[in-house]
Image (cartoon, grey):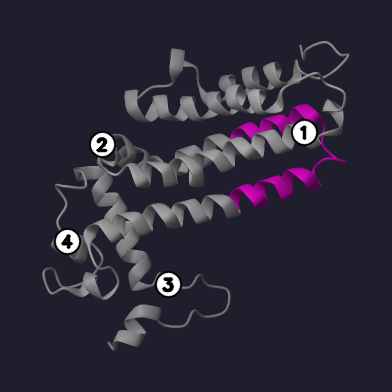
Amino acid sequence: MTRSSEAHGPSATPGTRAPASTRERIIREALRLFAERGYSATSVAEIEAASGLSPGAGGLYRHFRSKYELLAAAINEHAARTRTQVAESLAVLGDMEDSVDVEARLSRLCRAGLAKVGEESELTRVFFRDLSQFPELVAVVREGLLQPMFDAFTTWFRTQPEYTGADADWNGVAAVLGGAVVQYRLFQETVGDSPGHVDKDRFVAAWVRLAAGLLPSRAPVS
């Protein structure tokens, strides 16, 4: 296989998903190994083998200059994907505004947040185990993955017609409600159980009840 075909992969047939490029496979497998074993305990040869390259032959270095550059690329790509996902989720919720009641939209918002944090379980493990030695990458996680989620909560509440006239600090609301979503998933990831043994459906129902309690001039949802 030539370097060009290795980098780009074969063309996808109509209606099928394009196969991952070598670079994408390296990033995916590296993050998985970092999450399982730790950054320092994972060798370049192990990443190459997991990615379908000849271990120890240097194929990884055609795409990344170092293991650190690979880690940084993985985190930056997850941050870019997060920004896209947040924009798409807000657009979907916006399309629901005229046809779905506010409680159902709140439930959708909460579940989307839980799904997003759960999707980043490997990165979460890498974050807590390894990133203290890389403060610049901690900043990428904070500003590129977490902050867009909090900004999305703020934007959503501010733009919902049902909340017009509510006396609320929406940044503060996003910190509390968005923080609860993040913490619920992080608790599961680090402790192995949900907070208070509360399952996801009960958490979402309680979250919606709290958020609906901010609606102006109406009683909380029963």
Q: Position of residue 17 (x, y in %)?
A: 50, 70
Amino acid type of disc 1?
Answer: Arg
Q: Nearer the viewer, mark 1 or mark 3?
A: 1
Dividing the picture into quadrants, the one containing residue 160 is top right
For label 4, the residue is 44
Q: Is residue 27 in the magenta section? A: no
Give, as a three-letter code, the residue at label 4: Val
Report the amino acid beneath label 2.
Arg
Estimate the spatial distance between the alpha carbons at disc 3 and disc 4, rounded to whole Å: 23 Å
Question: What residue is disc 1 on?
Answer: 158
Residues drawn in magenta: 85-111
Q: Earlier in the sequence, mark 2 or mark 3?
A: 3
What amino acid is found at the position of numbered circle 3 in the picture? Answer: Pro
Left or right: residue 105 versus residue 129 is right
In the image, which disc is placed on residue 19? 3
Determine the CA span between mark 2 and mark 4.
19 Å
Alpha carbon distance from label 1 to label 4: 47 Å
Residue 56, horizontal then vertical, whole percent = 11, 69
The quarter holding residue 189 reads top left
Q: Eyeballing the image, is 90 above or below 206?
A: below
Label 2 environment density (alpha carbons within 10 Å; few <14, some 14–19, many ≥20):
some
Residue 9 visible to the viewer: no
